[in-house]
Image (cartoon, helix red, strand yellow):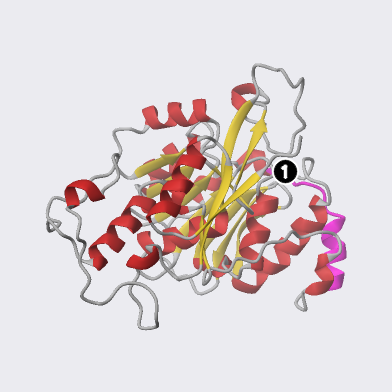
Amino acid sequence: MKKKKFAVIGGGWSGLYALKYLLEENLDTQLYERESNLGGVWFYKETPGGVYQSTHTTSSKTYLHASDFPLPDDTPHFPKHDQILAYLNSYRDKDLRLFFNTFFSTSTIIYGNLTCQTWKNFSYINVTKYQECLSWGSNGGFWAVEGLRHTAHKNLLNSTSLIIEVGGNRGHDTVKFIELYNASIISYEPLVPMWKDLTKQFKSNPKIEIHPYGLGNHARSLLIEPHDFGNAGTSIFRKLGAKNSSTIQKIQLLDIIQVIRHIRKTRTKNGIIDMISINCEGCEFEILPALILNQMIQYFRIIQFATHTGLVSESSCIYCQIEQALERTHKILYHYRKLWEGWVLKTTTAN
């Protein structure tokens, strides 16, 4: 039977709670709000609708809050409308699933994929270079110098830097980034057992956040089967084995555009993220096209990624379009084609 999807219309108290409870039942649900903020009638605006500028609650704060999230201690007994609005936003922000399944009319996202036909839509594509790229094989010379993905960023990263890791894996890259740069790291690892191991491994370091989600070109839940030693080859693009296999796990993917918008807003001063490192067995063919189509590539000082062409149909076509899109804003830091590569923003200067 085709999996059902659910929509919650309106981001007031009731809508937010409805989203919370539906997601807790692992139902594929998204909330849509007409305005640019949550709150329903508690969102004050100059145009008709909503509260007056002077509105306070007539119910005590004792009864207003959610059971799992009390109002701040310094909240007045009868809060003003903007305090209620701030509370609702805080309630959403504390739970990543609520945050990334809420959509406003002003937060348009371009959804789509790159294919062997889409290169014709981009005026910057050099056809000769594109066709040459299609003939490339992978450059296995990388494995003799694989530490480059950790050391190539000397003088570009330091203790004030922010790194996004897509694919926490067993924490090897995280360890190296901390050892070399002591940077802040936000890591996404969707396999829950591995997420638990990583959380335990790095629990004493407040600069490291490990989230139990993957990232993709749209939010969704799906089934996945661990593959290879230490789950190193696990991919959302691999076909499942026997349907009743005890090794199959359910994972959650968040929308990469929503995630990056949130991080830029809450974790950066100028909207620039120092590095995104992508090593997730094929998800690069979702994440990078999504960033390109939504014109967000330029918000990363460094982009490095592993390429897994054997997992995705039309992967060479997608890869070659990614290459020419990156050339517009970034220059090569290191490049082992169709295996591992790093790019740095053209306006970047050394620390």
- In this view, the residue in front, 39 or 233, is 39
Q: How many marks?
A: 1
Q: Does the stretch in magenta take in 137?
A: yes
The residue drawn where x is 87% and y is 64% is 131
The residue drawn where x is 66% and y is 32% is 223
- In this view, the residue in front, 237 or 284, is 237
- In this view, the residue in front, 268 or 86, is 86
Q: Is residue 156 visible?
A: no
Q: Amino acid at mark 1?
A: His
Q: Is residue 344 left or right of residue 274?
A: right
Percent position (x, y) of residue 331? 61, 67
Q: Does the stretch in magenta take in 120?
A: no
The residue drawn where x is 36% and y is 59% is 267
Determine the secondary structure under disc 1.
loop
Residue highlighted by disc 1: 308
Q: Is residue 204 visible?
A: yes
Percent position (x, y) of residue 67? 28, 40
Which range of residues does the magenta coloring cover? 125-141
The residue drawn where x is 55% and y is 72% is 346
- Is 206 situated above or below 132? above
Q: Quadrant of residue 120?
A: bottom right
- Is 201 situated above or below 105? above
Q: Is residue 319 left or right of residue 110?
A: right
Q: Quadrant of residue 298?
A: bottom right
Quadrant assignment for the C terminus: bottom left
Residue farthest toward the bottom in the current orientation of the protein? 46
Percent position (x, y) of residue 45? 35, 78
Q: Is residue 71 left or right of residue 148?
A: left
